[in-house]
Amino acid sequence: MNPQITLTKLYQMKKNGEKIVALTAYDYPFAKMVDESGVHIILVGDSLGMVVQGETSTLPVTMDEMIYHTRIVARAVKNAMVIGDMPFLSYQTGIETAVHNAGRFLKETGAAAVKLEGGAGVSDTIRAITKASIPVQAHIGLTPQSVHQMGGFKVQRDEDRLLADAREVEAAGAFSVVLEGIPADIAKKITDVLSIPTIGIGAGPDCDGQILVLHDLLGLHDRHLPKFVKQYAALGKAARESIAEYAAEVQNGEFPSKEHCY
């Protein structure tokens, strides 16, 4: 068994130029498979609103739902670092609320850290949470909880603002930062100037690590995929075919056969 991934390990990987592998998971069976596959970070993302709950954005996801999903993921994981994603309005309404909700992830789920969206505007929140001994992963660039303010899921190209946000969240104590929907050349500049690891999603190959949504990677649904997603399997197609075959065999009396009877 590999040693459990810690903050120290992630810092060392950046220093050594070793790529960090991150992936989302939302339930026990998939979390176990992801962990056993050697992934370093498992994010229980509020993306579950879209890929698990069928919502059109991440905004409806509640704190209690995030606690539930993070708890069952953490139960399955032996090696990877589990990070709980702080949902919309769990940290924007005040520092005290933010620290309390971040603490719930560590206290009630077994997660090792939390993630929250935003740059300079949430630096005081990051500082307060880290002061409470709760590791924080920041998230800048395309931040899905701000989809309405941004006018949709758009690539973020303001280099000066992105660099300022990155420096600000590092100074506030974030141990890592997700770079989403950022041109590759800007993501490289951010990665080069920060001492903390950068984890890219739609931010090019020069980040210290990469993350994708598990359901996108495995082809578990037929929704539109962003340009940055590489689909490594077509499990949704295989599942639909298998279910249709089962239904047909039940209807024609082929299943269950003698071999499936006591």
Image (tube, rainbow, N blue to C red):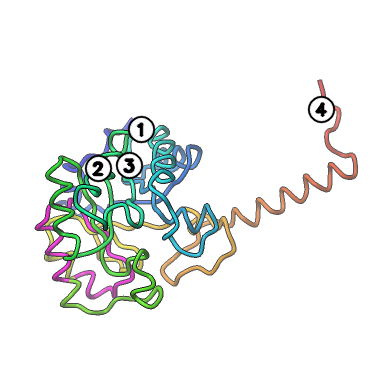
Q: Which residue is mark 2?
A: 100
Q: Cα distance, mark 3 to mark 2?
A: 18 Å
Closer mark to the observer between disc 3 and disc 1: 3
How crowded is the residue under tag 3: few (<14 C-alpha within 10 Å), some, or many (20+)? many
Q: Is residue 178 magenta?
A: yes
Closer mark to the observer between disc 3 and disc 2: 2
Span highlighted in magenta in the image: 163-188
Q: Which residue is mark 3?
A: 82
Q: Note whether 176 is above or below 189 in the view shown.
A: above
Q: Position of residue 87 (x, y in %)?
A: 36, 53
Res 259 label? 4
Closer mark to the observer between disc 1 and disc 4: 1
Q: Is residue 56 magenta?
A: no
Secondary structure, mark 4, is helix
Q: Cα distance, mark 4 to mark 2?
A: 55 Å
Sequence-first disc among 3 and 4: 3
Sequence-first disc among 4 and 2: 2
On-image quarter of the N terminus: top left
Q: Note whether 26 is above or below 3 in the view shown.
A: below
Q: Position of residue 34 (x, y in %)?
A: 43, 43
Q: Which residue is mark 1?
A: 78
Secondary structure, mark 1, is loop
Circle 2: residue type? His
**On the picture, is 150 further left or further right than 125?**
right
| Residue in the image at 90% along x and 44% along y | 252
Circle 4: residue type? Glu
Residue at the extreme left = 171
How crowded is the residue under tag 2: few (<14 C-alpha within 10 Å), some, or many (20+)? some
Circle 1: residue type? Lys
